[in-house]
Amino acid sequence: MQSARPRPRGRAGRLLLAAALVAAGGTVAVAAATTVPAPARAAVALNDSEVTANLWEWNWTSVAAACTDHLGPAGYGAVQVAPPQESVKLPASADGAYPWYEVYQPVSYKLDSRFGNRQQFAAMVTACHDAGVRVYVDAVVNHMAGTNNPAGTRGYAGTEFSGYSYPAVPYGAGDFHRPGDNCPTGGAINDWNNEAQVTSCELLSLSDLYTEKETVRNKIAAYLNDLIGLGVDGFRVDAVKHIRKDDFAAVLGKLDDTVAEGRRPYVAQEVFDGAGNPALQARAYIGNGDVLDFAYAKGIRSAFQGSVSALANVPNWNLDAPSANVFSMVTNHDLERDGVVLSYKNGTDYVLANYFALAYPHGKPSVYDSFTWSDRNQSPPHDGTGRVTDAVCGAAWNCLSRTTGVKGMVGWANAARPVKTVSDFTTVNSNVIGFHRGDRAWIGINDSGSATTATFVTGLADGRYCDVISGVATGSGCTGGTVTVSGGRATVTVPANDAVAIHVNARPGASPSPTASPTASPTVSPGDRIATTFTVAANLAAGQDVYVVGGIPELGSWTPANGVKLAAQGGGTYRATVDLPRSTGVEFKFVKLTAAGAVTWESGANRTFTTPAGGTYAVTETFRGDTVSTTVATTFSATATTVYGQNVFVVGNIPALGGWNPAAAVALSPAAYPVWRATVDLPANTAVEYKYVKKNPDGTVTWESGANRTLTTPAGGTRAVTDTWR
């Protein structure tokens, strides 16, 4: 029986569910959707920046608010938004109600989706332009919906469709690649290095558009031009590997110039890595636009989960494309679910990696924010009918793009943009580095658990600079730490698991930078404050949040409801940064608080510390009275060839690996086929037995031969095993 959605199968497996399910289509029928708002026009000059905030699956109201309140003032150049076209609506799929991948199965090019309607979309574009932010749309143009959706499935606007019939566009059977037509197989892609199969056969049972036909090209171009007419400035195009290059070039040639700036729309193409055929590798596609660099994101993960000193060798990495042709990232929705890159679940490693990506001159950097998840296919928060609710930063939504440090690094990246090289890359030790971009900006990164003091060549003119990680520059000083440069050098204490960054446009007493939002209280000047980061590991019950509360007004004066709420970082870790008076003794405790006001104080005496005279300060603790489990992120890599319909899993003797039950085994991703990978949190200091299995299309299981494999997890950190199927 066919499932309600395209399921990852064979060599493309689960990777291609995410990769292939990200293409956005559009066409002429959009004109008949509803009243057409007037084209959006930029009311102000758009920010001179290459940095993009990827607000994945945020609704249009939330994106508009983010542009106005955060992205524009911080100096972001663009915001990337999810596919806006009408998609399938799956209230009862095998993966739960309204899984995230719905939006990558278009059923029409109406701008009526789970994120909002046409008017809300147009209003969002206008709001972002008014804030100086461009809008890039995630465009699905390789395919329409899955041919294996149940009969009667409809779209969010109520549109009816069937496997190869989409009357709202309209597309008919002759508008799709079919077995025996241009597709040389029975319909599926069996050889991922065969260009004819990859571009003309169905990806995960998704109805593949016949882009060689001029009528199909015209309808795709009409959809994209409709978006351009509403003010859209560019496109992130998914599954480009599955469209012939000349077909996509023909579509691009039909597109209008942008409304706001009168230039060609920006194009970033998703071309998953791993192909052995050069014609299917990212570099082969740069004639049509920029490409996403998967190798760069994976290399960053390797460095921050190993030794950041390896970042000195980025120029020698085998990256997907030259810097000038790259849209760079630390993660995206596909890769974070495959476990091959860092994500919010990696805590400070993830934050520091984003600082690095904003500082390093490779590609056009992006910062990713979306909803938190425990199941790889779960829906974003919704109203019960699949419509996504407003993004509220905290437990359900991540908002890294609006944190002080990331906003500061956006300004840093903008200041450093004229200089495309790194100078004086300094390795203090394996986990502490520093470098500068000419005479524009310097950064130091400490990926260790202890503060480190060292002297760095900054390249900057002598004087005092504001640390943009911990605060901003104002007309009267710095709200965070300061760095003094003398003779082009500075002696800097880089806090544990943190960074310090300065640039030419962030000096005390200078005009406020775009990120400035003075936070001085009436009695304490900004220069007298210390950005203090509280981090606690805690086990929370349903409905509980964790706060820090203490004896000074900034910490609520011992009133829990007035304390500072800590945001979830993943893995039972919570964090908040508070500006506290310098050189001040502080007493505090962590508390758990419910919406009803029920308070649980941690046990033991009050905690104490004294803020320093300058710089920043960090507190890392465990909630006393909790038993916080310790796990080790363990990456399994298995080289295994498969046939169409097979997937590879790891199963073992502990619950995290299914307790030897293949039905509960952990699925591995084929992102780097024939290497299958997954990262699993295993208990620390534990001997583990495991094996790999292949699950066949008929539900049977094939076990690898030989004795059980074994490993022992360390007391902390990470563990990796590399195996070959027996």
Image (spheres, rainbow, N blue to C red):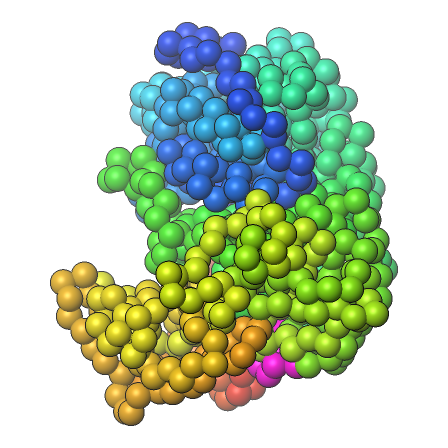
Residue 536: image location, x then y, percent: 40, 76
Pick the quarter of the image with the C terminus: bottom right
Placement of 132 over or under 341, stated as above or below: above
Residue 33: image location, x then y, percent: 39, 12
The answer to which of 221 and 434 lies nearer the viewer is 434
Dividing the picture into quadrants, the one containing residue 706 is bottom right
Seen at 83% across and 55% down, the residue is: 438
Left or right, 161 with reference to 652:
left
Question: Which range is magenta?
Answer: 447-452
Dividing the picture into quadrants, the one containing residue 468 is bottom right
Q: Is residue 230 visible?
A: no
Placement of 160 over or under 102, stated as above or below: above
Pick the quarter of the image with the N terminus: top left
Q: How many marks?
A: 0
Residue 216: image location, x then y, percent: 61, 13
Placement of 503 over or under 535, stated as above or below: above
Seen at 21% across and 77% down, the residue is: 600
Seen at 65% across and 57% down, the residue is: 507
Seen at 56% across and 61% down, the residue is: 478
**As drawn, which residue projects farthest toward the bottom?**
605
Dividing the picture into quadrants, the one containing residue 623 is bottom left
Q: Of helix, strand and loop, which mostly describes the magenta segment?
A: loop
Left or right, 314 with reference to 302:
right
Q: Is residue 120 visible?
A: yes
Magenta region includes residue 204: no
Magenta region includes residue 451: yes
Residue 665: image location, x then y, percent: 45, 65
The answer to which of 213 and 38 lies nearer the viewer is 38
The answer to which of 546 and 709 lies nearer the viewer is 546
The answer to which of 580 and 297 lies nearer the viewer is 580
